[in-house]
Image (cartoon, helix red, strand yellow):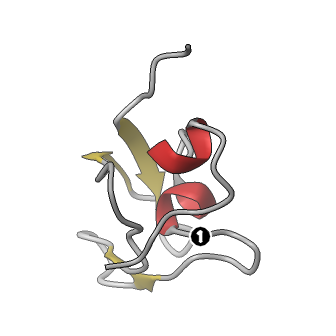
Amino acid sequence: MSIIKLESEITCPNCGYKKNEVMSTDSCQFFYDCECCKQVLKPLDGDCCVFCSYGTVACPPIQAGSSCCKST
């Protein structure tokens, strides 16, 4: 069994600002507010959350082999 990483660095596609964030293990994060430019990030088509779209590490459910996170 592989270790699930809970930290991912999100990069804003609008301004390039990067920040390390801790991911939830039980739900998707559909929106993320960039601290620098205030752009609201949303998942790209085909991705379940902002970490899968803009992070250095996919969300925990995807890392575990699930097809997608569950929303809350």
Q: Could you tell me which residue is drawn at 41 percent across and 43 percent down? A: 9
Which quadrant, please, contains the N terminus?
A: top right
Name the secondary structure under disc 1.
loop
Percent of width and height locating residue 66: 63, 50
The residue under label 1 is: 48
Percent of width and height locating residue 35: 23, 70
- Residue 52 showing in the rendered view: yes
Q: Nearer the viewer, residue 43 or 10?
A: 43
Q: Is residue 66 left or right of residue 18?
A: right
Q: Could you tell me which residue is drawn at 76 percent across and 74 percent down? A: 46
Q: Nearer the viewer, residue 23 or 40?
A: 23
- Residue 59 showing in the rendered view: no
Please say if 5 is above or below 63.
above
Please say if 6 is above or below 50.
above
Please say if 63 is above or below 25.
above
Percent of width and height locating residue 55: 52, 50
Q: Is residue 32 left or right of residue 53?
A: left
Percent of width and height locating residue 62: 60, 47
Q: Could you tell me which residue is drawn at 58 percent across and 76 percent down? A: 43
- Picture mark count: 1
Which quadrant, please, contains the C terminus?
A: bottom left
Under mark 1, the amino acid is Cys
Q: Nearer the viewer, residue 21 or 46?
A: 46
Please say if 19 is above or below 28.
above
Mark 1, Cα crowd under 10 Å, few <14 / some 14-19 / many 20+, is: many
Q: Is residue 56 left or right of residue 24?
A: right
Instruction: Residue lying at the far right in this picture: please name it.
Output: 46
